[in-house]
Image (cartoon, rainbow, N blue to C red):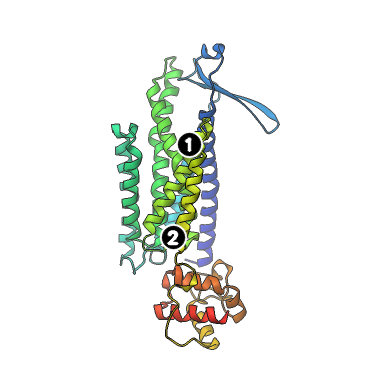
Amino acid sequence: MDVFFGEWVSLLLRWFHVIAGIAWIGASFYFIWLDNHLTEPPDWKKKEGIGGDLWAVHGGGFYEVAKYKVGPKAMPKTLHWFMWEAYSTWISGMLLMVWIYYFGAQAYLVDPSIRELSTPAAIALGLGFIASGWLIYEVLCRTPLVASRWFTPVLLVLGTAYAYALVNTFSGRAAFIHMGALIGTIMSANVLIKIIPGQRKMVAAVARGEMPDPQPGLEGKQRSVHNNYFTLPVIFLMISNHYPMTYQPSYSWLILMAIIVITVVVRHYFNLSHRGIKRPILLVCASLAFIALAGLISWPGGSSQGVESDAALLTDEEGLVLVQDKCATCHAANTTDPMFPSAAAGVRLETMDEIERWASRIAHRTAVTRDMPFMNRTEMSDEQRQALVGWLKHRF
């Protein structure tokens, strides 16, 4: 396949996925906000079956929103549904994952230093992780546990087990993306098999002139709340591939779960706030936890990691040759790595001036996060990493 064509397909899928995700997550935020701001309506509205209402102003106009306790006496002529935002986000996300991580499995999915896997085996494991994770969640949601305070801790334990298994099976970035795909699959399946079917039952009952059974609506609301708490973790996982300091460490499964917990706490703060319950301590704790996590990841930190060596410093000529040999295959005006038709991330490392510009980043990515060279495609040894960073520190 032409590499340029592959990049355009990737761009189109990613662009569509982000747009669809914005629409879906925006709807989730809005409707949870809406539910949490409903107030008791006047008596005349109660007689019509309305359970809560609110007034809002936006875009130069006033809005009056009312929510029925169960359903209206008759179906309105036009009824708006919210489901394709979820479906299009999941479909585009899965297509993007397949395009990048499955078609390019030996580059993006499989890391031989973690586990030697054939492409079919790696793909099967990836899909197996996603399917089994969703199935376990779905079974738990159909037990009394879902209504107890133990539901969240159980999910946290199971999520930690999956995170540990993923980072010990795939490359770091692929492990994080698969956790995101698992959560996204759970969220989309909630819409497909619980929320929308429940709404269809309620609509059908109203159309028949019957009082709808409130249970499908209550179950749908429960899954909607689950989805709302999943939004911030899944957003992080969508962008995690840009931040190797989170997925490269051997304990990245702990980093992943810590960020999930932090973002869930942040979401909980806002959900409580929408109901008039102010708990700023939640935001304070989440912020301090994030700062502490960043500090722990960086400690002892910096490009000094792995630099001390008794070996003689490289000469400028030797340093330039090493960078050109190990880095410039992907970071050059005319790249030689077939996976990168142009300089990766727009970074070129062919001259001393270009190396000086990116010296601190080169040192960090080769010695600390160790995600460069990409998947170590140029087979840079530990000794070469030490020599390169020592030269960069001394030279620049």
**Residue 348 in the image, given as x and y percentages of width and height:** 58, 74
Residue located at (31% from left, 51% from top): 161
Q: Is residue 103 visible?
A: no
| SS type, badge 2 | helix
Q: Nearer the viewer, mark 2 or mark 1?
A: 2
Question: Pointer 2: what residue?
Answer: 296
Check the image and report above or below for 22 versus 47. Answer: below
- Of residues 200 and 231, the one nearer the viewer is 231
Check the image and report above or below for 357 versus 49. Answer: below
Residue located at (45% from left, 67% from top): 300
**Residue 118 in the image, given as x and y percentages of width and height:** 31, 65
| SS type, badge 1 | loop
Farthest right residue in view: 60
Sequence-wise first label, 2 or 1: 1
**Residue 223 in the image, given as x and y percentages of width and height:** 40, 35
Residue located at (54% from left, 35% from top): 30
Please identify the quarter of the rendering in which residue 164 is found: bottom left
Picture quarter with the C terminus: bottom right
Question: What kind of residue is marked 2?
Answer: Leu
Question: Pointer 1: what residue?
Answer: 83
Task: Determine crowd level at label 2: few under 14, some 14-19, many 20+ residues with C-alpha closer than 10 A.
Answer: few
- Of residues 291 and 91, the one nearer the viewer is 291
Q: For marks 2 and 1, give the CA distance.
A: 41 Å
Question: What kind of residue is marked 1?
Answer: Met
